[in-house]
Image (spheres, helix red, strand yellow):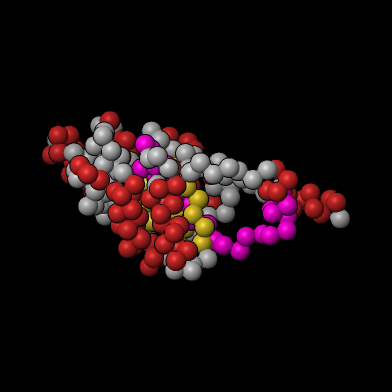
């Protein structure tokens, strides 16, 4: 019996970057007892992104938009749990190197939110496209039945017309190629609106994050 209990405790654990929300973690004994006696029946929605997902700059990281999506999931009484794997500063190349580790746990819905930092750094569109495709390929290979959602991004007009148009086109092209649900522009209604952004003009306030969650939910609820 002791060996059986030990085997049940060997479950993968995800490190959720920047999303503790200031809540004290349960002690090890409580966590082990919960894992052993109350296995989760909920499916997993993995948000894989950068500082927008991580809730950079928010007083309470729990206000980040993936966490707000969880509230909508709960209100709809859907059997899903959100895992927020946002990492501030993440690029598509960084995500490509990080994704294998995150796929050690089951994934039922994969939400990809990367590319913004590539755009701000002027990384060639071709490179960003390939990195995102490589991430998608890894998810599809590990979990071929997982549903896929892509969050579209745009860059400021000062990046130049050719780059702006090329970057914007990355997301609908990848979504069509990989049969992914697409949120055309994650920051719709927030980007460029001063009162909905922090002082850097890039990261949303808590109020802005709620709008991002609404943008995502309009598409995600149909997927779920």
Which residue, as the protein is rendered here, is positioned at the far right? 1
172 in magenta? no
Q: Residue furthest top?
A: 121
Residue at left offset 43%, top offset 43%: 61
Q: Which quadrant holds residue 121?
A: top left
- In the rendered image, the quadrant that contains the C terminus is bottom left
Residue 129 in sight in this render: no
Report the number of numbered marks.
Answer: 0
Q: Position of residue 107 (x, y in %)?
A: 53, 55
Quadrant in the rendering for residue 167: top left
Q: Does residue 74 appear to the left or right of 174 in the view shown? A: right
User: Residue 63, position in %: x, y?
Assistant: 40, 48
Q: Residue at x 41, y 57 (%)?
A: 69
Taking 64 as reference, is 15 left or right?
A: right
94 sits left or right of 183 in the view: right
Q: Which x, y percent locates residue 31? A: 68, 48
Of residues 202 and 128, the one drawn nearer to the viewer in this rendering: 202
Residue 183, quarter of picture: bottom left
Residue drawn at the location 32% of the way across and 63% of the way down: 218
Q: Give the quadrant of the N terminus.
A: bottom right
Q: Position of residue 28 (x, y in %)?
A: 70, 43
Q: Is 68 located above or below residue 26 in the figure?
A: below
Residue 46 is one of the magenta-drawn residues: yes
| Residue 147 position (above or below residue 157) | below
Q: Which residues are magenta?
A: 32-57
Residue 11 in sight here: yes
**Of residues 164 and 28, which is closer to you in this image?**
28
Going by the image, does 162 lie left or right of 104?
Answer: left
Residue at 28%, 38% in the rendered image:
198
């Amino acid at each position: 019996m002791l060996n059986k209990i030990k085997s049940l405790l060997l479950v993968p654990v995800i490190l959720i970057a920047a999303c503790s929300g200031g809540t004290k973690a349960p002690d090890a004994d409580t966590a082990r007892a919960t894992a052993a006696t109350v296995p989760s029946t909920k499916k997993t929605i993995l948000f894989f992104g950068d500082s927008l997902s991580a809730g950079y700059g928010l007083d309470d990281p729990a206000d980040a938009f993936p966490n707000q999506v969880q509230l909508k999931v709960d209100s709809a009484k859907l059997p899903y749990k959100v895992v927020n794997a946002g990492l501030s500063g993440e690029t598509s190349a960084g995500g490509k190197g990080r994704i294998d580790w995150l796929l050690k746990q089951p994934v039922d819905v994969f939400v990809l939110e990367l590319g913004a930092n590539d755009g701000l750094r002027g990384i060639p569109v071709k490179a960003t496209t390939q990195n995102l495709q490589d991430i998608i390929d890894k998810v599809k290979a590990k979990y071929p039945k997982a549903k896929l959602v892509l969050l579209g991004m745009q860059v400021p007009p000062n990046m130049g017309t050719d780059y702006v148009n090329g970057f914007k086109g990355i997301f609908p092209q990848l979504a069509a190629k990989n049969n992914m649900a697409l949120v055309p522009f994650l920051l719709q209604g927030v980007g460029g609106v001063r009162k909905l952004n922090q002082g850097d003009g890039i990261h949303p306030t808590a109020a802005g994050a709620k709008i991002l969650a609404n943008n995502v939910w309009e598409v995600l609820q149909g997927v779920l």
